[in-house]
Image: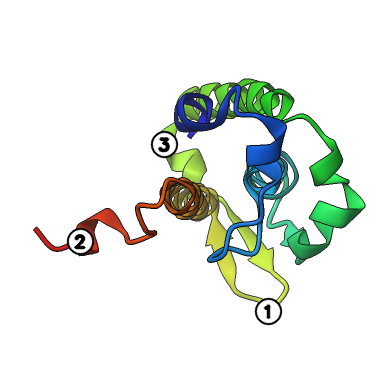
Amino acid sequence: MPIFLRRTLAGLPRAALLRQPENDKSPLLEHLWHTLDCDTDLYGLRIRRILAEDRPVLEPIDVGAWPEARAYTSRDGDAAIAEFEQHRAVLIAELEALEPERLARVGVRADGSEISALGVVEQLAAHDQDHRWRVTAILREFAGLGAQRPELQSP
């Protein structure tokens, strides 16, 4: 994900990062900061808690409040990319250093269900995939190419 963000969004003019897409509720700049904050304050935090604590309770987090509360649109896009690269590299290094069985440790969601550290890693990967598609769709829209998922395009 960090490579994707750097290659697709680094150095874009602020006006492009703030432009409101027609088919997405968030401009590109919000995607950048949201992706970073989810890495640090949601998925990474949950993974680390599950690995460090015995069955931690994983309270819901209102990520919808972050854009305004954290003033995403007043911040710098390239700074978000740089911070994301650093944080993701640290998280990957921590995960690579683990014994595989540690990924089976669990946390407890607010509804009482359990999720393993590996399950949170899988959620993180799905979150990345969703934002890669959404960013690509926005860029396609801005280029006048439409926002279809590549696998759904006709030959």
Side (left or right) of 17 relative to 5: right
The residue furthest bottom is 111
- 109 and 142: which one is in front? 142
Side (left or right) of 79 relative to 140: right
Q: Which mark is residue 44?
A: none
The image quadrant that residue 44 belongs to is: top right
Q: Which mark is residue 111?
A: 1
- 10 and 92: which one is in front? 10
Q: Residue at x 71, y 41 (%)?
A: 33
Q: Residue at x 54, y 49 (%)?
A: 117
The residue furthest right is 69
Mark nearer the N terminus (3 vs 2):
3
Task: Please name the residue that numbered disc 3 is placed on.
Answer: 100
Mark 3–mark 2 Cα distance, whole angstroms, equals: 39 Å
Compared with 28, 91 (above or below) is above
Where residue 49 sits: x, y (%)?
71, 45
Mark nearer the N terminus (1 vs 3):
3
Mark 1–mark 2 Cα distance, whole angstroms, equals: 39 Å
Q: Quadrant of the C terminus?
A: bottom left
Where residue 6 sits: x, y (%)?
52, 25
Side (left or right) of 129 relative to 44: left
Where residue 112 sits: x, y (%)?
66, 76
Report helix, strand or loop for mark 2.
loop
Task: Please name the residue that numbered disc 2 is placed on.
Answer: 153
